[in-house]
Amino acid sequence: MKHYSYLYLFTISIAVLLVIFGFIVWRSGIYAETFLNDATSKNFVLVSLGLSICLSLYAFHRGVIRTGKRIDYLKFFMGTFVVLMAVAVIPLMTLAYYLPGKTSAYAASYSYSPRGHKSCAGANVDDPDLGRNIKICYPEGNYQFNKVIFVSKKTNALGSVILFAMTAP
């Protein structure tokens, strides 16, 4: 296939649109319901840091950065670290979402959290397994005024996935 043909342009355009659509579906479905535990988050940051150090050393060895200034090496290192964190979180959260785990349920008090610019409206709940406050987006029931929520979740080695949440009638 020639790079200047309409077929190539059509194929690339469809592929880019599918990637964008897949990211939107992942963000609204998997990312909003999955919470990583502390050990997984720390290991994720350490692995990303180690990989970015290895990539930076490889780039230094191969002479990819031409200027030789220390600030350019630091920029390359930080850039690879940020890109690795942004790209690697997608398969990690998806893996945590699809891994089987133990299903459990609990009832807890919550506080209403209004919709923000980059977040959804929902309930802030203290999760006993994760040991921190999580935000459950759009639980069933009248979550603006009630103060008790029932949460059903799946807990596995990587974290927790909210299966269902409903406020008390």
Image (cartoon, helix red, strand yellow):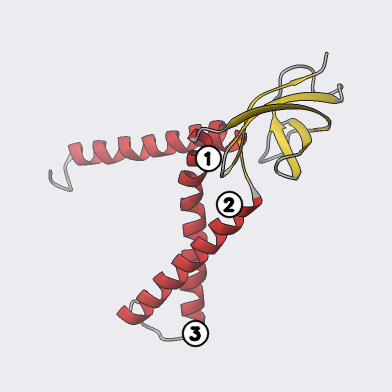
| In this rendering, position of residue 139 left or right of residue 58 | right
Frontmost residue, 152 versus 21: 152
Q: Earlier in the sequence, mark 3 or mark 2?
A: 2
Frontmost residue, 97 versus 120: 97
86 in relation to 154, above or below: below
- Circles 1 and 2, Cβ within 8 Å, touching? The answer is yes
Mark 2: secondary structure:
helix
Residue 77 location, x and y as percent? 48, 72
Foreground label between 1 and 3: 1
Q: Which mark is residue 18?
A: none
| Mark 3 nearby-residue class (10 Å; few <14, some 14–19, many ≥20) | few
Q: Residue beneath label 3, please?
A: 70
Q: Residue beneath label 1, please?
A: 96
96 in relation to 84, above or below: above
Q: Which mark is residue 40?
A: 2
- For the N terminus, give its image quadrant: top left
- Amino acid marked by disc 2: Thr
